[in-house]
Each structure stands twice: as C-alpha cells, then as structure tokens.
Amino acid sequence: MQISPATPWINVQGQLSECPIWHRPSQTLYWTDINAGHLYRHDWAAGTSERIYEGEKVGGYTFQSDNSLLLFRVNDIARFRPGGEAESIIPFDHEGSVRLNDVAADPAGRVFAGTIGKTKESGGLFRIDRDGSVTQVAGGTGCSNGIAFSPAEDRLYWVCSTRKRIHSFPYDKATGCLGEPTILFQGDDSDGYPDGLTVDSEGNLYNIRWTAAEYGLMIFSPDGKVLHRQALPPRASSSLTFCGPDLRQLAITSAADKSDPDREADLYLIRDLPIAGREEYRSAVLL
C-alpha cells in the first residue's frame, strides 16, 4: 500500500489535540483539545478554523442523529449545540476512572466510551444505551483509546494503550453485546503506544502510535496482518479520521510534547488515499 507523506495542516497552538471527526453534511472537521477544554471545527471549503466550546475537558464526543453533539467529559455526558451552552444529561461516576476518553457511536445509535484509569488496570470500556443507561463491557486498562467497527457491523475493535493491544470483539448490533475478544495486534517496547483507530471502506484498520520512535501510523488487514508502516512528522501523534468530500484524506491530530519542540501543526493531513474511508456512525442517546 502506497500512501503520501503527512504534511502540516492546521495550527491553533493547542495542547492535546484529539478525537477528529468529519461531519459530512456540513463538510467540516471537528476535534477536541482535551487539556485546554476546547472543541474546534474546520470548514473544508473556506479553510478556516474556529473554537466552538470552552469548558470542562472533553475526552470524546459523537454527533447525534438530530445534529447536536454528545460531549463525554470528566464526570458526565453533555448535550451541546454550537452557539449554545452544554447541558449535562447523564452523570458518569466510575470509581476507578479519572475521566472519559475516546468514544464511538455504534450502528444502532448507542455509544461505546472508554476511560482513563486511576491505575493501570482500573479504567474500562462502557456502553451507553439509547435510554441513557451505562454498562461496563471491558476493563483492565489504564488508558482506553480508539474504538471502531467493521464494515459488516459484526466486530468491534478496541485499543488498550496500557497493554499495547488492539482487541477484536464479536459484536451483536441488535443488542450491543460483545463476545469474547481476540488480540488482533500486540505491540512491543519498540513501536510506541496504540492510540486512535479508524477503519476504511474495505475493513482495514488504521492505527496511530503515540510517541512511536519510527512508525507513527500502522495499517492492518481485518485479520491483523500489517499492510503498511509510515513515519509521521509529529512525535506525539494521537488520533485520526477520514475526511474531505470523497473521504480519501486522512486527518491526524497531535499533542505538544517536550521531545518535539519543532512540531509545526496541531493537525496533519495525508492526501489522496488509495482506499476511501467511512463515515462515523451517529448516536441517538436520549432522543
């Protein structure tokens, strides 16, 4: 697989840029700066970026089917529309977790959300059903990260950064239940930490490697075969998403890091991918 180099794209002088999501109806890219408590969006046609939220840290978010956003913050889930105020709608209180982190809506409108643990094993993965109920579905992590679904909607992929693993769960769309996982990929000490995750239209997995010494981007086949490794300019790359009118561009977020004083941008872009991406699902929680 041949892919173009990542080039600097958007610079807002952020701290920890994360969770990019492409909103196809408006042709805009959204992302959060977690440590600063900011949420941004970038207009693709105009080439302009703006901050649309400032407040409590947002570890992840989804677009709802009514075009509002669900913000997964430290101790709650809030409903938010740009230009308005965030409204807390679901409390989140898990004794072993510091805050919510990466999230993903599923094909039926639920949300799977991970947490940052107080210890290396006390965080987890949770399912938020459409009625607002919260159920823990996996644990044993200090840092839950990327979540994605197979195009056939029969597998859920989950990144445990702590154990450097990408898990593959059997997934039941009708109930949201997960089966026993297999380990799709096990990292070692040489390749950074698996972080953000997304899946293209052919089912291949794209994974960002936080602080990887050599390959910040890895692409896997659905059965875990490594298809591609690529260096990235920022050392602290964090997440990624397909974007652009044809979903053939790859937006990559990054963080300010003392080991990378010459970082040129908060977001980088890989253009003209050989395989198109897929849109993220929309949630429908408490609608």
Image (spheres, rainbow, N blue to C red):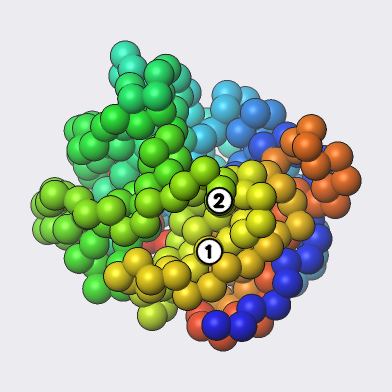
What kind of residue is marked 1? Met
The C terminus, quarter of image: top left
Residue for badge 1: 218
SS label for mark 1: strand
Crowd class of label 1 (few under 14; some 14 to 19; many from 20; radius 10 Å): some
Q: How far apart are marks 1 and 2 (CA)?
A: 10 Å
Up the image or down, 170 lies above or below 44; here it is above
Crowd class of label 2 (few under 14; some 14 to 19; many from 20; radius 10 Å): some
Report whether 206 appears left or right of 256. Answer: left
Report whether 179 appears left or right of 201. Answer: left
Residue 200 image point, x, y percent: 44, 73
Identify the residue at image location x=28%, y=53%.
183
Question: Which mark's residue is nearer the viewer, 1 or 2?
Answer: 2
Q: Can residue 109 be seen in this view?
A: no
Identify the residue at image location x=76%, y=57%.
233
Check contact, mark 1 vs mark 2: CB within 8 A. Answer: yes
Q: Can residue 168 be seen in this view?
A: yes
Q: Nearer the viewer, residue 191 or 151?
A: 191
Identify the residue at image location x=53%, y=73%.
228
Residue for badge 2: 191
Report whether 189 appears left or right of 159. Answer: right
Say which label, 1 or 2, has the lower sequence index. Answer: 2
What kind of residue is marked 2? Asp
